[in-house]
Image (tube, rainbow, N blue to C red):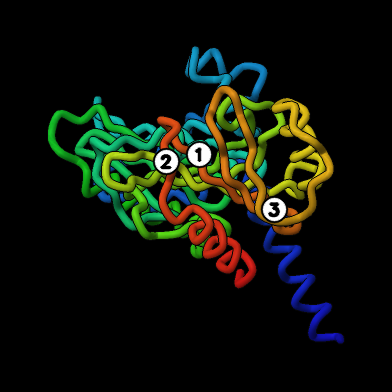
Amino acid sequence: MKMLKLILLLFFCSSCYLSAQTPADLKSWLPVVDGWTISEKVEIFNPDNLFDRINGAAPLYIENNFREMTQLEYTRGDDYISIQAYRHATPEDAFGMYASERSPDLKFFSIGGEAQGDDSGIFFFAGNIYVKMWSSASENVFATMESIAAGLANRIDPAAAYPPIIRALPKENMVPHTEAYITANYIGHTFLNAVYMAKYKQGNKPYQVFIVDAGKSGGNARDVLDKYFTFTKQPLDYKENRLTVNDRYNGDIPVLWQGQYIIGIFSENGDEIANADNILNKTAEALSAL
């Protein structure tokens, strides 16, 4: 029992640590780089003034439970490497923000939970921090930025990874690097929040597999489904099991209710997806094994 309490205490402290990085912490974690100086200038932005720095992009960050952005800088003469570290409420929110800005035109790297970038910038998530880096240098300084990113990511969270629920999504037919976390309004519905999803393709049929974590959004799966079935004007006398939502805007959506989770398949073109029940059941099995 004492050992269990100790493990729980360590887990709690670790969780607090991940959510408590300060601008001073982030600055102190920047690695020393030959030829470059860490600037004393530190700028801090919150939800009230983030618009001043990133203009129209601010609402999406705030929707992803943004808390604070720290802007830091390396200098070398007139050159600079700028770093924006966005602290979010949870690691899922930081991953979600990173995923929302993911681009198929960039290369992917094993930094933090995942990184993407090119010669001019690197973007990664680690813990509850989403980091964006870029340089003004005329020559290629990617190796320098990569070294900085790796060092900073390791200090933020050396065990950074995709959220566990993402790993329950099926791998077959998944389009690479499309996993995401949607904080609110999935497929246009205000009651579909805290959604883990990825994009898939069967032949020429694109679709998404999603998992709603109703417990994370402060309710339960029955509440979410009641709102969905009220919207679709379907009877509310259903039980925890395999269901079909007749969404007039998004087509028929096969779902499986399992505890606090709602697993579903959304066809982007309204196509019928082969082996839908098998996809739902395998995803449910993977969730149970987490």
Residue type beneath disc 2: Tyr
Residues at discs 3 and 1 in contact (Cβ within 8 Å): no
| 209 or 82: nearer the viewer | 209
Q: Bin the neighbour count of mark 3 within 10 Å (Cα to Cα): few under 14, some 14-19, many 20 and up.
A: many
Q: Bin the neighbour count of mark 2 within 10 Å (Cα to Cα): few under 14, some 14-19, many 20 and up.
A: many
Residue 207: quadrant of the picture: top left
> Where's residue 273, x and y in %?
43, 46
The residue indicated by pointer 1 is: 266
The residue indicated by pointer 2 is: 207
**Can see residue 233?**
yes
The residue indicated by pointer 3 is: 257
| 166 or 71: nearer the viewer | 166
Count the marks: 3
Q: Earlier in the sequence, mark 3 or mark 2?
A: 2
Distance between the alpha carbons at the discs numbered 3 and 1: 15 Å
* Residue drawn at the location 27% of the way across and 38% of the way down: 104
Residue type beneath disc 1: Phe
Q: Earlier in the sequence, mark 3 or mark 1?
A: 3
Distance between the alpha carbons at the discs numbered 3 and 2: 19 Å
Residue type beneath disc 3: Trp
As drawn, is 146 to the left or to the right of 124? left
Distance between the alpha carbons at the discs numbered 2 and 1: 6 Å
> Where's residue 252, x and y in %?
56, 35
> Where's residue 288, x and y in %?
64, 68
